[in-house]
Image (cartoon, grey):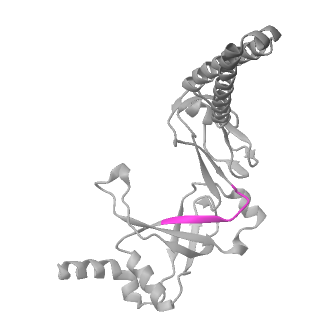
Amino acid sequence: LEPTVRQEVFAPRSGLVDEVLVAPGADVSVGQPLVKLRDPSLELDLQRVHGETQTVRRQLEAARASKTSRDLRDENPIELYRLSASEREYEQQLHNLESELKLLHHQRDSLVVRSPIAGRVLTWDLAARLTARPVERGEALVTVADVAADWQLVLTVADDRIGHVLEAQASEQTAALPVRFRLRSADVPSTGHIEKIGITASVDTKDAAAARPTIEVVVAFDKHELTDAARRDLRPGITARAEIDCGRRPLGYVWLHDLWDTALTWLRL
């Protein structure tokens, strides 16, 4: 079970987690700070460029002061020309350093990771997982989801059963086959319909030797199922058992189709 509106928040660059600013389960708004990172190399660059900026600014002020000296302007035009050239050089250096400093400040501001959507923080035990930990650019830090929006069920259907679903879709000429399911946390079953079917099969990497290939099937809740009371009981990650309505078949086939499919597989080999 998962909300349809959810986003992973990633580290914008490599660094250390300096501070976790939200708690698990907290409601956050768009743009609210979630995690603050620190990049030691960026801090060194900022100190270096700031020092160089101050040095060039003093050199520029000295060149301008010398240039405006009346005695130098009246008696030494060659030196005045040299100071004018130095002034332009210092101005260009200062412009370049200020641009670099602006970019570095922007990079430092981006180390405050903010929520891209309004919703609820789903990642559990954030402080223990992240505080003082090094992270790489692009690493997922926090998951935020809008639990007030629609929810969906992601089913894993064994590859030897997905054929029945695809056949039913073709015969009924609709992709939205009805689904009945019961959440492990609920006492009564719920209904929904297939929204989409994955185009590739995958195997659980935790136990690839024993696992069977499965295809993901996304099921949307029927609208009348999501009352305010029902929403309060929904929790991301809750498991469910589901039945997909693939039409009518003879009773014997319904009871024994696993044996029938196994026999056909052996005969076709």
Residue 30 image point, x, y percent: 74, 49
Q: Which residue is more in the foreground, 67 or 25?
A: 67
Q: Quick check: is 147 in the magenta stretch?
A: yes
Image quadrant where residue 141 sits: top right
Give left or right: position of 183 versus 73: left
Q: Which residue is more in the foreground, 150 or 181?
A: 150
Residue at 34 percent of width and 81 percent of height: 256
Residue range corresponding to the magenta coloring: 146-155
Q: Which residue lies furthest to the right in this view?
A: 70
Residue at 69 percent of width and 44 percent of height: 25
Residue 150 image point, x, y percent: 68, 65
Image quadrant where residue 255 sits: bottom left
Q: Can residue 54 be seen in this view?
A: no
Q: Quick check: is 26 in the magenta stretch?
A: no
Q: Is residue 267 visible?
A: yes
Residue 178 lies, with reference to residue 40, above or below; the image says below
Give left or right: position of 216 versus 115: left
Residue at 37 percent of width and 49 percent of height: 206
Q: Which residue is more in the foreground, 38 or 159?
A: 38
State the count of labels: 0
Image quadrant where residue 103 sits: top right
Residue 200 image point, x, y percent: 39, 67
Q: Which residue is more in the foreground, 217 or 142?
A: 142
Residue 70 lies, with reference to residue 248, above or below; the image says above
Residue at 65 percent of width and 59 percent of height: 5
Q: Quadrant of the C terminus?
A: bottom left
Residue 111 image point, x, y percent: 63, 34
Residue 21 lies, with reference to residue 74, above or below; the image says below
